Amino acid sequence: FPLRHFQGRAASQDIEEPTELVFDQSSIAVRDGIAKRIQARLRTPDIRFEFDGRTAKLVGTVATPRQRDLVESMLRLEPGIDEIKNELTVVSLE
């Protein structure tokens, strides 16, 4: 919304301030942080995260379809990720 500039009288001028929120996912530290946060919550060391720009690819194995979907859902919450390629394989422990 425009900001109004007041000088003791009615606003005479609208000031537009552009706002852009940018997350740089190119940093290895940022990418490692994303992977570590998700792996720590799920305790699933058999997942590999690959990043290409704003696209993340999940590769590896999980125990259940629910876990596969959960990993993808958690990754969707990370800023700067626009697309996810979920190539996780469900491997039954039985």
Image: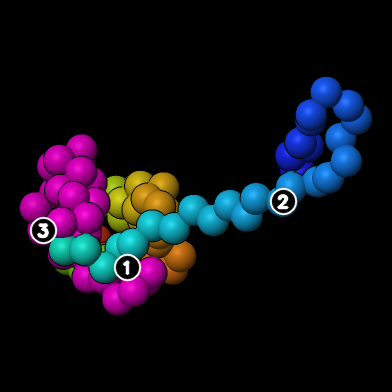
Disc 2 to disc 1, how far (Cα)? 35 Å
Image-based side of 78 in relation to 11, left or right: left
Residue receiving disc 3: 46
Callout 1 amino acid: Ala
Residue receiving disc 2: 16
| Front residue of 66 and 25 | 25
How was the colour assigned to the protein in this rendering? rainbow
Instruction: Return the residue found at the far bottom.
Output: 52
Q: Earlier in the sequence, mark 2 or mark 1?
A: 2
Image-based side of 45 in relation to 51, left or right: left
Measured as percent of width and height from the top left, residue 73 is found at: 40, 50
Disc 3 to disc 2, how far (Cα)? 49 Å
Measured as percent of width and height from the top left, residue 6 is found at: 79, 30
Disc 3 to disc 1, how far (Cα)? 16 Å
**Front disc: 3 or 2:** 2
| Front residue of 35 and 22 | 22
- How many other residues sit within 10 Å of disc 2, few (<14), some (14-19) or many (≥20)? few
Residue drawn at x 22%, y 70% as measured from the top left: 50
Residue receiving disc 1: 56
Q: Earlier in the sequence, mark 3 or mark 2?
A: 2
| Front residue of 29 and 87 | 29
Read off the magenta span.
29-57
- Figure quadrant of the N terminus: top right
Q: Quadrant of residue 23?
A: bottom left
Callout 3 amino acid: Asp
Secondary structure at numbered mark 1: strand
Image-based side of 43 in relation to 76, left or right: left
Residue drawn at x 38%, y 69% as measured from the top left: 54
Callout 2 amino acid: Glu
Q: Earlier in the sequence, mark 3 or mark 1?
A: 3
Residue 87 is at least partly visible in this image: no
